[in-house]
Amino acid sequence: MRGRSGRAGPQEGIRRTGGEPVSLRTNRARLVVALVAVALAAAMLGSLGPMPGIASSHREAPLVAADPQIDTTDVWAFVSEDRPDTVTIVASWLPFQEPAGGPNFYAWAEGVRYSIKIDNDHDARPDLEYRWVFTDHRRNPDTFLYNTGPVTSLDDPDLNFYQTYDLIRIDQDAGTKRVLVNDGIAAPSHVGAASMPSYNANLFHAAVERFGSGPSYTWAGQSDDAFFLDLRVFDLLYGADLSEVGDDTLAGFNVSTLALQVPKDDLAFRGNAERHPIIGIWSTTSRRSVRIQNTDGSSDSRGRFVQVSRLGMPLVNEVVIPVGLKDYFNSSKPTQDPAALPLVQDPELPRLLNAVYGLAIPDSDPETAGIQRADLISVFLTGVDGLNMPEGGTPSEMLRLNMSIEPCSTTCSSLGVLGGDLAGFPNGRRLSDDIVDAALRVVLGVLLADHEPIAETIGDGVDANDVPFNGSFPYVA
């Protein structure tokens, strides 16, 4: 996690998963990425107005762009490399956190429900929900300071503002609701070396909470943004200087992150991961339906909880869902996803490529009228046959993970399945998976027998995160 004084992430025990770096191999590939980005930018910015940046799902819809505490940026799910009998799920919110963001820095929204949902019987409905709810605490309301002296522990009296949370597990099938963690302490924002001289040891890692007999773990706090990509293409094609591609636009920014690690059987249908290894995962964020702003500066929230953000597969709401439907998608449920089939079957991005660069629009069945994209339907809505596609499942957008596939050893690739590594995207998603390169190639039809040669090489030139990930839970830096 990046503080004001620079990178303070732990250096020992770090391992980055990934194969040979995948880069832009031709100027043609660079130009395609640039043209696509400019076309997308023109379409989006024309409707939304100025935006500071667009990433996996960073500020992807009008409502969440104006309410960053509810803006889910990314979801990851993978079999834990150092504990392969468990699954780790990571989700991040509140994008583009500048480390020097004092004096208030960055907090979770009080009273909001931050949730990870699991579908283990493949009916597009959540069978399990892990829900975090945060509470604010201020030791001294008569100072503007986040901390009043050096902070060396999570309960240090000099940490003036801190947040606690309850983690609740809701089992829809059993009809039970159980508190797993009560008053867990979230890792605070990293103010800097003077205020938090041993941030990683005393605050970051100390915030890991153990629960259950598994054992299971959870963590809440500020982390480096684990998504990586080059977005400067929105700056008028790099000013025509294409030699500048390959800069990680999100380097240096933090996010607010939740992490969960639980035994596989805790997530599987009927508690049996061996017989039922495939699960679907997505995140939601829910607020009270009414907020009242009082004349004394305070505010109250009332009414029922309504879902205001949703994220499973990366980039879906970003570049598949049109701007007029983005807020609706964030409030929708996976059971409603079959209505979005035409958007997946004939997405806008290949047509933009065709319009600005003359590339053929991929079609999995040219003999059938209209554009057919069976490859995209399998990746985003049903799961890939023989990999993570459950039998008889309801088509729905979520991250699907086959828990029976062990973590990679010598065959690791940041391209995941496209690179011959079945433990990676789209079989779940690891922190190190290069989503932009993989998604661009899939959209351009690399899974189809007949595809443009550029579909095998296109990328953004950013092949790994700017800092190494941790080798143990919560894995984020």
Image (cartoon, grey):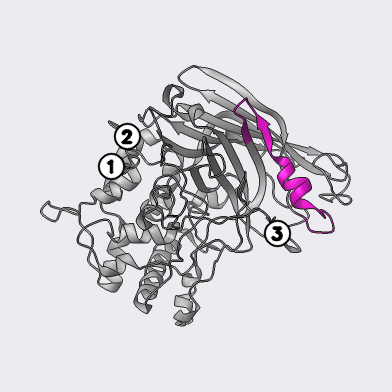
Image height of 228 relative to 183, above or below? below
Residue bearing the label numbered 3:
99
Residue at the outermost front position: 410
- Reply yes or no: does residue 201 show up in magenta: yes
Front residue of this view, candidates 139 and 283: 283
Q: Magenta span covers which residues?
A: 191-217
Where residue 387 appears, as percent x and y from the top left, is: 33, 42
Q: Please name the amino acid that badge 3 sits on.
A: Pro
Q: Between marks 3 and 1, how big is the CA–CA gap?
A: 43 Å
Is label 2 or label 3 in front?
A: 2
Residue bearing the label numbered 2:
390
Q: Between marks 1 and 2, how big is the CA–CA gap?
A: 8 Å
Residue bearing the label numbered 1:
385
Q: Specify whether residue 231 is in view.
A: yes
Where residue 46 appears, as percent x and y from the top left, is: 43, 63
Is label 3 or label 1 in front?
A: 1
In the image, which disc is placed on residue 318? none
Q: Earlier in the sequence, mark 3 or mark 1?
A: 3
Residue drawn where x is 87% and y is 45% of the image: 158
Q: Secondary structure at mark 2?
A: loop
